Amino acid sequence: MELRGAFDAAAGEWWQGALPQERVVRAEQTGHRTLAATVRHQEVCRSATTEGTRP
């Protein structure tokens, strides 16, 4: 979210040339994939540590 906000703010600067929209989109997609992989990894670790225990 911060990346998109910074991009939108910079896009409004009059002295700024055209911003590389495709690079920003790729960075956002990479960030989303990294976040999703991190969440999946945490879920696997949690299930591995709680496996075999009783509630």
Image: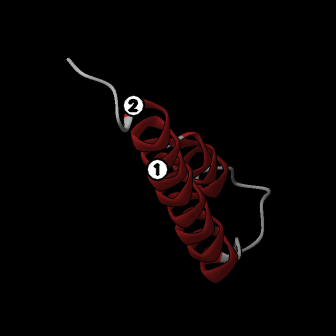
User: In the image, what residue type sits under mark 1?
Assistant: Val
| Amino acid type at mark 2 | Thr
The residue sitting at 39% across, 41% down in the picture is 47
Q: Earlier in the sequence, mark 2 or mark 1?
A: 1
**Residue under circle 1?**
44
Mark 2 secondary-structure assignment: helix
Image: 47 above or below 15? above
Is residue 23 left or right of 33 when viewed as pictured?
A: right
Question: Please, what secondary structure does the residue beneath circle 1 have?
Answer: helix
Camera-near label (2 vs 1) is 2
Q: Is residue 20 shown left or right of residue 8?
A: right
Which residue is painted at 61% across and 57% down in the image? 11
| Quadrant the C terminus occupies | top left
Q: In this orientation, which residue lies closer to the viewer: 38 or 12?
A: 38
Residue 54 image offset from top left, x and y in percent: 24, 22
Give me the disc on residue 55: none
The image position of residue 29, as x and y in percent, is: 53, 70
Is 10 drawn above or below residue 28 in the view shown?
above
In the depicted view, which residue is nearer to us: 9 or 3? 3
Identify residue for label 2: 50
